[in-house]
Image (spheres, rainbow, N blue to C red):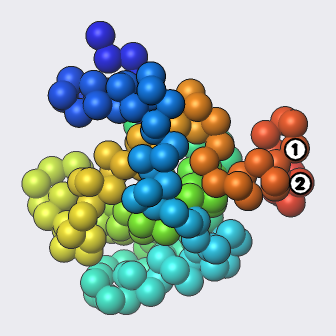
Amino acid sequence: MNGLKYLAGYSEKLTGQVELLLAENRLAGFLLGKYPTTHEIRTDRALYEFTLEIKTEFLRNAQPLSRVTYDGKINVINNALGLHTFISRVQGGRLKAKNEIRIAAVFRQAPLQFLRMIVVHELAHLKEREHNKAFYRLCEYMEPAYHQLEFDARIYLTQLELAGPLYRENSEMTDEDGKSPTDPVPA
Ligand SMILES: [Zn+2]
């Protein structure tokens, strides 16, 4: 049985390799070899600008984005690394549409490539609601390594849960509750 919940859905061949690395205490070294550093996109404002840059490059004509934020309430176990919400309502006789993207807060401190992969996924939902072929084609158009990066991001979540923080600043910045002292208080 595959006991790695973040990797449910992947083949035993792939998850077996991760289990072996875990068992031999080599998962951290594997990840750090591939992803030695984290990004510096820590604030919602920086995240919005980062997302807008990718949107402008690839999806200039898609609907506008109202908000992009990190969200500590996203449950990454339920397969969601981010969320896209589309709200439309009639306001003053006109239809107003709002697109919001939320990214699981755990990726505030993560390799840039993982953040980019999640942003690309949520941006693709501006065009395709469902996870169909067209959707994944769009993801790969914006990020050719999309599928590998999603797998690696899930390995990273596995590492964090079963083997501890990966990046030095993870342990330096967090207190014993696992919360960063600079994290906003949840509203
Ligand atoms: Zn999705």
Q: Quadrant of the N terminus?
A: top left
Q: Nearer the viewer, mark 2 or mark 1?
A: 1
In percent of the image, x 52 and y 37: which residue is there? 159
Pointer 1: what residue? 175
| Residue 146 seen | yes
Rendered position, 22 above or below 69: above
Rendered position, 116 above or below 157: below
Pointer 2: what residue? 181
Determine the CA span between mark 2 and mark 1: 7 Å
Q: Indicate which disc, 2 or 1, sits on the residue closer to the N terminus.
A: 1
> What is the secondary structure assignment of the residue under circle 1?
loop
Question: Are dots 2 and 1 in contact, CB under 8 Å?
Answer: yes
Measured as percent of width and height from the top left, residue 10 is found at 24, 32
Rendered position, 74 above or below 57: above
| Residue 127 seen | no
> Would residue 151 appear left or right of 48 to someone viewing this image?
left
Measured as percent of width and height from the top left, residue 149 is found at 33, 56
The response on whether ligand 1 sits within 8 Å of label 2 is no
Rendered image quadrant of residue 47 = bottom right
Few, some or many residues within 10 Å of mark 2 (<14, 14–19, 20+): few
In percent of the image, x 49 and y 55: which residue is there? 32
Work out whether residue 9 or residue 51 is closer to the camera in this orientation and state it.
9
Rendered image quadrant of residue 92 = bottom right
> Would residue 129 appear left or right of 6 to someone viewing this image?
left
Residue type of the residue flagged with mark 1: Asp
> What is the secondary structure assignment of the residue under circle 2?
loop
Measured as percent of width and height from the top left, residue 48 is found at 57, 77
Residue type of the residue flagged with mark 2: Pro
